[in-house]
Amino acid sequence: MRVTALAGDVPAALAAALAARGVEPERADALAAGGAPVALLVEPLDDLAAAALVRGAARAGVDCHTGDGWAVVSGPLARLGGLARPAADAVLPERLSAALGRFLQGRQEAPAGWRTARRTLPLERSCVVGILNVTPDSFSDGGRHGTPDAALAAAVAMCAAGADVIDVGGESTRPGAARPEAEEELRRVVPVVRAVAETGVPVSVDTRRAAVAEAALAAGAEIVNDVSGLAADPGMAEVVRAAGAGVVVMHMRGDPHTMDARASYRDVAAEVAAELAERRDAALAAGIPREAVVLDPGLGFAKTTAHNLALLDRLATITALGHPVMVGPSRKRFLGAVTGRPVDRRDPATAAACVAARLRGARLFRVHDVAAAREALAVADAVLAEREGEA
Ligand code: HH2
């Protein structure tokens, strides 16, 4: 007799093992998905709701740990689903079962594409976003693309290397960077956006200013990448909505001057997810469609090396919000801390971080070295496609 591990933490592997032994593929999929282990943090929670959750968890056959104002319920997905369904004896208060139900539903529904002002970008294979900083002072490529012609040539080279989107930025957001005036940011960004968009590649504009976003969208950009998560400029959400643009809602705290001092978390993944969910809700409340929203944990923004690594590892906390997830590890300090490499020698580490994130569910990767990331992600995509194919 032999005991073989079936990679039980990967539902697709379990489905493949069942299907290979004669279980009908659809049933194997359902069994495997329902058996996937899930842990959910519920907070804030009053004593009555916590007691109800403990009773409901016992009835549903899942674990429940509670503390001061919080509970963690964990168990197979199928049983957690049972916990969320209102029962005849109404063990859980309505508000709580509705919140759980909303969450579990959203978790299963990350759109397969990204709606922008001009198209829906497919996200089956990894989407590589090439960074084009038209700034004198960005931490790794500052000053390299001083004229629109040089910037266009860099964009064309990134597309040839496999970029799916070009992200044009006119403001460095590295810690402590000085902010250019709006006119200066417009002067840097708009001609480059126009020239790159004319080649047909989707262009995003990396800005915190509504006026810059509006001008870039008019010049052909179709996505707004806002590192403040639409919080810095009260006019930004409406500009995005009116243009029907795609949007990257990124997490940070404070601004580039204050963010390092605010890198303090009790549980970084849960707090980043909760703060991002608030920014996402604000975007949806402003009328931006759900399919237009991509979420980004903001590696390096108000995060220490340990925070960045924990976020990469616990990316499921972010993907569970039900949107495609972007990561931007490219050449950042935490990769220098891990590898000992200076900023101009961090592309292999960047590619490795992208693969780690891909295997944990990220779909979009903002990088300087497109060719290296594309190649590394081709392997990760192939491994995941094999997993899907088997299931
Ligand atoms: N990181 C930077 C800028 N924009 N946007 C998203 N969505 N995610 C990121 O992680 C992100 C971002 C900072 O990197 P970089 O553009 O290379 O440098 P700088 O801000 O100095 O121009």
Image: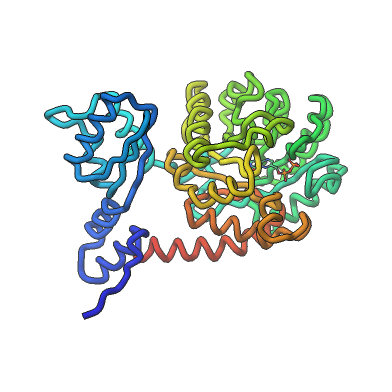
Which residue lies most toward the left here?
Answer: 88
Residue drawn at the location 31% of the way across and 66% of the way down: 16
Query: Taking 340 as reference, is 18 left or right?
Result: left
Q: Is residue 32 above or below residue 175?
A: below
Query: Looking at the image, can residue 226 be seen?
Result: no
Residue 378: % across, % down: 56, 63
Query: Taking 359 as reference, is 136 left or right?
Result: right
- The colour scheme is rainbow
The quadrant holding residue 47 is top left
Residue 100: % across, % down: 31, 33
Quarter holding the C terminus? Answer: bottom left
Residue drawn at the location 48% of the way across and 42% of the way down: 318
Give whichever of 192, 276 is nearer the camera: 276
Which residue lies most toward the bottom here?
Answer: 1
Query: Taking 139 as reference, is 373 left or right?
Result: left
Residue 174: % across, % down: 74, 40
Indicate the quadrant of ligand 1 in the picture. Answer: top right
Q: Is residue 349 above or below residue 209?
A: below
Query: Looking at the image, can residue 44 be seen?
Result: yes
Which residue lies most toward the top here?
Answer: 234
Query: Taking 134 as reference, is 101 left or right?
Result: left
The quadrant holding residue 132 is top right
The quadrant holding residue 13 is bottom left
Residue 148: % across, % down: 84, 42
